[in-house]
Image: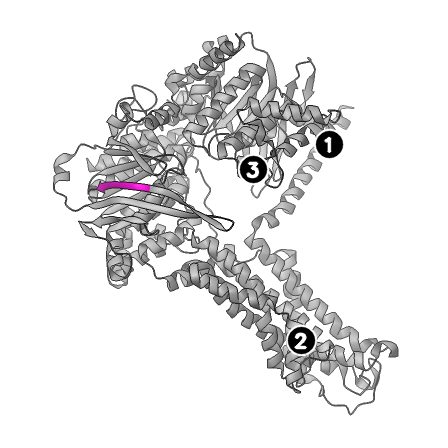
Amino acid sequence: MAEHETTGEDVREAHMVTGAADTVAAAGVVVDGLPPDLPEAVGDGSLAAAVTGEPAAATQSRSRRRDLMPSWSPKLVVGLVITGLIVLFAIIVPFFTLDPNSTDYDGLLKPGEQGHLLGTSAIGNDIWAQLAHGARGSLLIGVTVGVIALIFSVIFGIFAGYLGGWADETLSLITNIMLVIPALPLTIVLAAYSSSRSMWLVAGVLGLTAWTGSAIVLRTQARSLRVRDYVLAARVAGERSRRIIAVEILPNLLPLVAAQFLFGVIFAILGEAGLSYLGLGPTDAVTWGTMLYQAQNGSALTLGAWWWFVPPGLLIALLGCGLSLVNFAIDEIINPKLRNVPKATRRVRKARKVESRAAATTEEAGA
Amino acid sequence: MSATATRPAGPLSLPSHDAYLEGLTPVLTATDVSIDYLVDPPVHAVKNVSLTLHRGEILGLAGESGCGKSTLAYGLNRLLKPPADLASGAVTFHDESGTDIDVLGLSGERLRVFRWDKISMVFQGAMNSLNPVISVKRQLFDVFRTHRPDMPRKQMLAEAQELLRMVGVDPNRLDSFAHELSGGMRQRVMIAMALALRPQVMIMDEPTTALDVVVQRGILREIMRLREQFGFAVVFITHDLPLLLEISDRIAVMLQGEIVELNTAADLYERPQHEYTRRLLASFPSLTGDRGSFIRTGETGGWPDMTDTDQRARRTGSLEVKDLVKDFRVRSGMRSSKFRAVDHVSFTLEPGKTVALVGESGSGKSTVARMIAKLEKPTSGEILLDGEPSASRGVALMRYRNDVQMVFQDPFASLNPFHTVGHHLERPIKIHHRASGREGVEAEIERLLEKVNLNPPREMADRRPHELSGGQRQRVASARALAPGARFLIADEPVSMLDVSIRLGMLNMFARLQREENLGVLYITHDLATARHFSDEILVMYRGQVVERGPSDRVILDPQHEYTKTLLAAAPNPENHGRLREEVRAELARENA
């Protein structure tokens, strides 16, 4: 009796998936002693598999973790190389440069003159040294702002989205208020209060205004994940809210969170440059922004001192570009369609070409 | 068995099939069509398929998901998108005027002109195939504007109104947008759009799959009626074989990119040649036949024995639902109104007994399930476990969850893609203290996986959901529901997302678990046939109310309520082959007279 019941279902799906059988006859062997017309002898992996003996769905051996990693697209490689080089530059080079704040050198030396790799500014700073230390400052501000924005956006976005109800209303209200506070005027106001602005103050202000966009994106995603069956199933199983957020929801948001983080970093570096250019940047540190500010003040453009403003400007643009490329690569994990369309089109076009060439040769041969 | 199985070409020359073909003129011929998906490695989705569609016939394309039936249809209409590539073959369209058109040779402007004009298409999801930001009128006008540029506006309007009238939609709905129409109406509008240029061939890709049976019946009737009036040929693609057997003239059964059997519907039903066709037929339980028989009379299978009474007597306890009511607030602008989704529903689940809750989408059956699973709070009414009111929070809720578990509809959504099978089972075991220690938990996981026939359990536990088939996932979900040691199981459409051929196997598993574990099962479904065969009692829900209840055989074979009768009449039944056509013909004759 019990035996019969078991045949009632499947028994064979493991075989199906591993593709044990090759032919109809072999499939019959797999069914193994069951009356061939028993409908439930039809296992999982679809009836088609039962008849042809081929596995219905090819199993992928790649693990989920690896699926979550971006595939090595040209975008990702170029983005990582650019970002990596700039980060290495910021970490290593400052140890070997002159003092960036020292004004002991001759003003406006051209690159290469008197051993100054990138020349000097009007007041005698070594540009190479400033560039290297500025990279440190800019990146530090960028990462700090990214982390602050990440924490806030996760708290406000995911909690609001998952909890719903009053918690959602309250957290969303705060998010919306913060969303409409513009970073620049806020910093100008803060700048008016404190004559000396530390790098951390600037980072804090930028961070406070940078998280809202991400929070709204994450909230929407969390809201849709919250009613996913697997989250409901976890609730039915008796999981607590905290664990559901941390274990069931957050991992599925990781690519999105990573993209939002990179976006936050780009925003911060550009924002810092903008603030500094207006003279509202940090007063205690060198950043690419402060370099541009000094170049503007020292009328580098009219003096034709391109080595003063081109390197920091170029590096800001490059870093933004590199991080954006990485971001696009992450985008392709979240939305695999973005990745597959160009590739698929190329393949079909290629097949077409091969075909028409083959047709042409046969025609020629016929002629 | 093996002789017929390996010789798919055989049925093509059956005498009855040849007799059918006499006097018919072809409208679309496909010869040796092969379609590949150029992924890595390439997938041959359609392999050397030859098919002739005749003027005015309904040709059914049957097969399971992934068999290439949709790919073939898209190929015939040149709608393939990369990476799909029509590798070889020829498709010829025989126009009414007598000229033959090489469909694959068309390109650019000539293809555009040809497409909707000669061969039109009704897509699967009407929700997605209507543009949500453009009114129905403008979408119909678009068709005329691109294909009949000389048509005056007034005539366009008249045509559009006529089209809607023909498909049974009020012409006043022309200014409506997609979201203002019901699913059935949207599909009717899609058919109107496909009909706009009076094509000679219509390809219908699962046109009624997402619809409720009653709505589906209306659409089918409309299609039959229009076919009688305009004489277009239809390629009807669906996995629902009983439906095809009822309405189509000929059926082609596809298996892994090949047509394994092609025959008239009546013959295919009476004398299936290919092993696969036979098995497919045996996957659909008979609605009105003997208990335990399939749609093809005379064959019965290893159905669960539902009359095992003495075992049942040993069980105690109950899950009782009393006057359950659920109101949803519907907000429209500043005003909010109440919508009663569940209206005073009462029933009792007992161990060892299966109660089926059947009804159309929106009837409130899933809301009942979610309330019992404590995912939704009832507006009023009680859920009593063993006679005690159930709690909605704290330790008492945990105890309730220990006894009452749920299996969700979509196995692709109910497992977290990030976690392994083992993790999914480990959590409920730990939460409900079913085992202690690492080894104890692992042994318990293995026991559960063996229980749902996932072998070898140790290997399965390490897999992630994307490495499993739909059926395997649903087995994991069932194991998870059993993990806390539940006594009552709520199964919300547990097989509706699975391929037809594995549905019965899955339901048989539930039946076995029910007996082995003394489970009380609430089986929620829209499928009357499986509800009958797998339950002791059926409750029919309609607009939030239980309109009929009783022993399953009685409800299906001798329905009392009007709604149950409608529902049963709408269910596809191969025994009624040709009846719909006759009805429609008679109707048209009456109208003309």
In magenta, the rendered stretch is B343-351
Q: Quadrant of the N terminus of chain B?
A: top left
Q: Percent x, y for residue B287?
A: 32, 25
Give the mark toward the camera: 3 or 2.
3
Q: Chain of mark 2?
A: A
Residue B108: give its label.
1
Q: Quadrant of residue B131?
A: top right
B66 displayed left or right of A89: left
User: On the image, numbered disc 2 is attached to which residue?
Assistant: A89
A30 displayed left or right of A61: left
Compared with residue B221, is residue A244 higher up or lower down, i.e. above or below?
below
Label 3 SS: helix
Whether residue B352 appears in magenta in the rendering, the answer is no
B295 displayed left or right of B516: right
Tell me which label, 1 or 3, sits earlier in the chain.
Answer: 1
Residue B178: give its label.
3
Q: Amino acid under label 2? A: Phe
Disc 1 and disc 3: Cα gap in Å? 30 Å
Q: Percent x, y for residue B555?
A: 27, 27
Give the mark toward the camera: 1 or 3.
3
Q: Chain of mark 1?
A: B
Res A118 seen here: no
Label 1 SS: helix
Disc 3 and disc 2: Cα gap in Å? 56 Å
Q: Residue at x 55, y 27 (%)?
A: B170
Pick out the residue farthest to the right: A303
The overriding secondary structure of the stretch rendered in magenta is: strand
Q: Percent x, y for residue B34?
A: 58, 29
Q: Chain of mark 3?
A: B
Give the mark toward the camera: 2 or 1.
1
- Kindly check if marks 1 and 3 are in contact, taking CB atoms under 8 A apart as contact: no
